[in-house]
Structures are given as C-alpha cells and as structure tokens.
Amino acid sequence: MDADLKESILGALENVIDPELGIDIVNLGLVYDVDMDDEGVCKITMTLTSLGCPLGPVIVDQIKTVLSELPEVKDVDVNIVWNPPWNKDMMSRYAKMALGIR
C-alpha cells in the first residue's frame, strides 16, 4: 500500500469518534496498523480503551462506514487486539490537550 492511500485511510479514520471520550480513534492512539491487500480488503488492527468497552461494535461499524466511502476499499476487516494494552501515552498531543491530560 502506498503512503498516499495509507494517509487517506488514516484521514477517514479520524472521522470515527470514540463516543465516550469525544476524540477520534487515530488521535487516541487506538489504531495500531492499517493495511490493504490486492483485492481491496482494508485490515485495521486496533484496540479499545478498555477490555470491556461496550461501544466496541459501534466503533467498528463507524470504521466500516467511513472506509466504504474510499473507492479503493472494497471490504473492511477490523481486528481488535489487546496487546499492547492501550494507555494514555499512546494519545497524540492534540488528544491529550483536548482531554486535559499532561
């Protein structure tokens, strides 16, 4: 996958807002990897802020919706992983400022 396509995918993912925190999943540091195969299947490897996050299915649905708008993406596979565990140090400076975290 070329760098421009990866940027487009990450840009689209910035429209997926964590409903509990009100910050997008990219700036929260929840997206670990983005890849796409030759058939146009986009694989997102990510985590959630907590193991029992009840809004995980909502976030996955939002991911599939925003990525379906990109013409290169034919299908989306979201892989939720728990290792490495998410922590606040993974957030961007923007997310930390928005949430008042130092």
Image (spheres, rainbow, N blue to C red):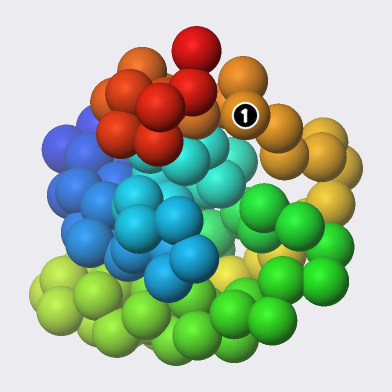
In the picture of the structure, the residue carrying the numbered disc 1 is 88
Horizontal side of residue 34 vs 1, given as left or right:
right
Secondary structure, mark 1, is helix
All told, the count of numbered labels is 1
Residue 46 spot, x, y in % from top left: 62, 54
Residue 73 spot, x, y in % from top left: 28, 73
Residue sticking out furthest to the top: 102
Q: Residue at x 35, y 51 (%)?
A: 23
Q: Residue at x 59, y 41 (%)?
A: 32
Q: Residue at x 48, y 75 (%)?
A: 59
Residue 47, above or below 101: below
> Which quarter of the figure has residue 85?
top right
Q: Residues within 10 Å of mark 1 (few under 14, many from 20)?
A: few
Horizontal side of residue 39 vs 89, given as left or right:
left
State the quadrant of the N terminus.
Answer: top left
Front-lying residue, 18 or 44: 18
